[in-house]
Image (cartoon, rainbow, N blue to C red):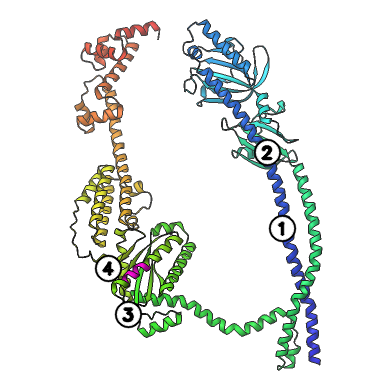
Amino acid sequence: MHSGFRMKQTLVFRFNTLFFKTFIIIILSSILPVIAANWIIYRQSSQLIEKQILKTSMNVLNKSSEMVNLIYREIEQVHKQIAGNKDVIQFIFNPHLEVYPRNLDILNMLGNISATNEYIESIYIYGSHSKQIIHSNGKLYSLDEFPDTFWIPVYEKSRVPIEWLGTRRVTEDTGFNSNVITSICNIPFRSESKMGAVVINIKERMIYAAIKGDNAIEHSEIFALSSAGIVISHRDENRLYDFVRYRPYLMQTFSTGTGSYIADMYGMKSLFAFTTSPHNNWKYVYRIPLDHIQNDSHLVLGIILAITLIYIALSMFISLAISRGIYNPVANLIKIILVSQRSGSESSLQKPITNEYKFLEQIYCDVIDQNRNLEQRLTELKPLIKEKLFSGLVKGGNENMRDISEKLNFLGYDLSLNNYLVIALQIDDYHRWYERYGDIERNLQKLRLIATIEKIIMLHAKGVCIEVKPDKLVAIINYDGDGKFIVIQENSVSFASEIKKIIENNFPFTVTLGIGRIYKNILDINLSYKEAMNALKYKLYQGKNEIIDISDIEIHENELYLYHSEKERTIINKLKTGNHREAVVEIDELMKEIYENGNISYDYLENIFIRITSSIAEVLIDTGISVDEVFGTHYNLYDELSQRETLEDIGAWLKRISFKLTHAINEHNLKRLDRNVEKIIAYIDDHLQEDISLNSLAELVGFSTSYISKIFKENIGINYIEYLSKKRIEKSKLLLKDTIFNIKEIGFRVGFNNIQTFLRTFKRHEGITPGQYRENIRNSGK
């Protein structure tokens, strides 16, 4: 009676404490997610409202930008029309030609365009040579008397087809002031000539009307800024010309082309949206106060709070009922355990249980501790035992049949059937796959590959799959069958085909499979392994994603192939001369010969390509060009060769490096050639008065006369004689202009030994005689 009473009192006391904890956990578990969810809903709703406002703002800006772009394109067409007008071009290039009707036609055209286009305030046509300006007001001005010359320096420095100036105040000769945006283009249109320009002044108010449109939100404002941060269009004309780039609320506008942000402007939070014009990099900015956005957000918050409070009240009642239902089974289980311990001492029954869950956990742990430790150790050892066992089998270990059988039984493998076969699998383009994926992903793919292969094996036979090298796996297959060898071998090829197909469809890589022979004893697995690995070497011929049977390979092993190394020397000679095209032809012929024979041993082929690679390295050394300069830092030709898995890969790689090598050699030779051409030209300039022959130039640079003629024509564009005559005529013109030497003496001074030759050559180049040229210079006063 006393013990039962004691146990009951302990349970009732602890029931109250644990029940309270359970209740708190349940109520918090139900309330906190709801509070978090409601907070997320509130944030999402607020963001949705802001996004909607932002979307509307960006739509307004995009529409404004489209309207202004239409105006810009219309102005560009006006530029094109005026700058392409033949009277305008004649005015620019023949300003002294007095053609009254021509100027009148230009004035009428400008007046008509200005009057019919509501965006245009005025138009000028400026002639740089004549310093005259034709105005759309019907007047012709000289530059000195023209009131608006602010744009002249900008025009003279401009290098773009159409130069746009920000808003500026223009004063006409009538005293009328107006705010205009100015665009300038060269005449002819889109030329680089600075002979003249078309200047169009656009009404700033019309630009603002296009920017503002009719979709603006109440209390919002929209304005335009130049790339320098100056206000160029605003509803308040007093704000024009303000420099605002470094004002805190506008600095983000200049950090990117298009975007939005929230900033504090004079103590009031506002949403700023902006975009950039592709024509002139001007910024269109749209500002919206956040008051009405926040009002909507507060309304959503009030609704969410009300819903949350109602849910909390309901959760408290539900949590109370759930807590009772959860705790009752715990209390009953503790009673059962205490009753089962009745055979113990009285003190153990009366000892209070400080934590019911820990009490139950301790009972459970005491029961399973020993088994858990044992299972853990066995689980940790199994992969190591498996790897050691099967690696020893394929590589020819010294274990006896008894040890092998015991380990197979421990690992759960039954390989007791009478046929043993090894299929070796190599991951194609392993280095590319290695670089594409990280360590964890690669290991996961390999584990999945091993599991897939073992699953396929178990569908038809017994066996296991292990990794023997980073890019190679081995499948050990054990199956029954006493048929003829050829039938069994055909079955092994069919089995390999199934593995290959499933890997193609389920993995981000393909594999090449090598098949060994079938053996009757498990201890001969190492022989099948060696044969399978040897078959894989002939992937070089067969290509990737293929099945290679050792029986097919060994048929050709005894056939003799006589290889001529002359092709290697031919390839290297083509590379040395920088002839990429012919080098590629020789590479193709070499690869074709190897393909057609198909029975060169793997080791012999490897030596061929190593020799070619070594010869390429020697070419680089001989020409004084570093490997890093041609192929990049840390590039190793031999490592790159070892990564090529097939003849096709090797051929493509040789073509790629031959292109880079010949390009580098040609660049090297071209630099040397350019220095020789410069040396020849400098020599001619310094010795014009002498009798300069091709032989003297050939001795100067160390080339033949025919080669001098060839490089002269290719680099200068004219032959050596024409160039020498041209330089002598240019020097004679300077002497005719700046000296009082007679014509005969000038001819001798520039290298003509015969006055008749000088006169004939001068007239052929200039169209007049030296005397006429000197007379023209004197008459012009220059």
- Check the image and report above or below for 363 versus 85: below
Return the x and y of residue 231 as percentages of the image width and height.
66, 30
- Whichever of callouts 2 and 3 sits on the residue coming sooner in the sequence is 2
- Secondary element under disc 1, as helix, strand or loop, is helix
Residue range highlighted in magenta: 488-495
- Whichever of callouts 3 and 1 sits on the residue coming sooner in the sequence is 1
The answer, for residue 715, to whether it is visible in the render is: yes
The residue wearing badge 1 is 37
Which amino acid type is marked by label 2? Answer: Ser
Kindly report which numbered mark, 2 or 4, lies closer to the viewer in this rendering.
Answer: 4
The residue wearing badge 2 is 57
For marks 2 and 3, give the CA distance: 81 Å
The residue wearing badge 4 is 551
For marks 4 and 1, give the CA distance: 68 Å
- Secondary element under disc 4, as helix, strand or loop, is helix
Which amino acid type is marked by label 4? Answer: Ser
Kindly report which numbered mark, 3 or 1, lies closer to the viewer in this rendering.
Answer: 3
Question: Which of the image's four quarters has the C terminus?
Answer: top left
Q: Verify whether residue 755 appears in magenta.
A: no
Return the x and y of residue 740 as percentages of the image width and height.
31, 9
For marks 1 and 2, give the CA distance: 29 Å
- Look at 33% across and 45% down and name the residue there: 660
The residue wearing badge 3 is 521
The answer to whether 117 appears left or right of 695 in the picture is: right
Q: Nearer the viewer, residue 658 or 173?
A: 658
Q: Quadrant of residue 692?
A: top left
The answer, for residue 241, to whether it is visible in the render is: no
Return the x and y of residue 131 as percentages of the image width and height.
52, 13
* Cβ atoms under marks 2 and 3 closer than 8 Å: no
For marks 2 and 4, give the CA distance: 75 Å
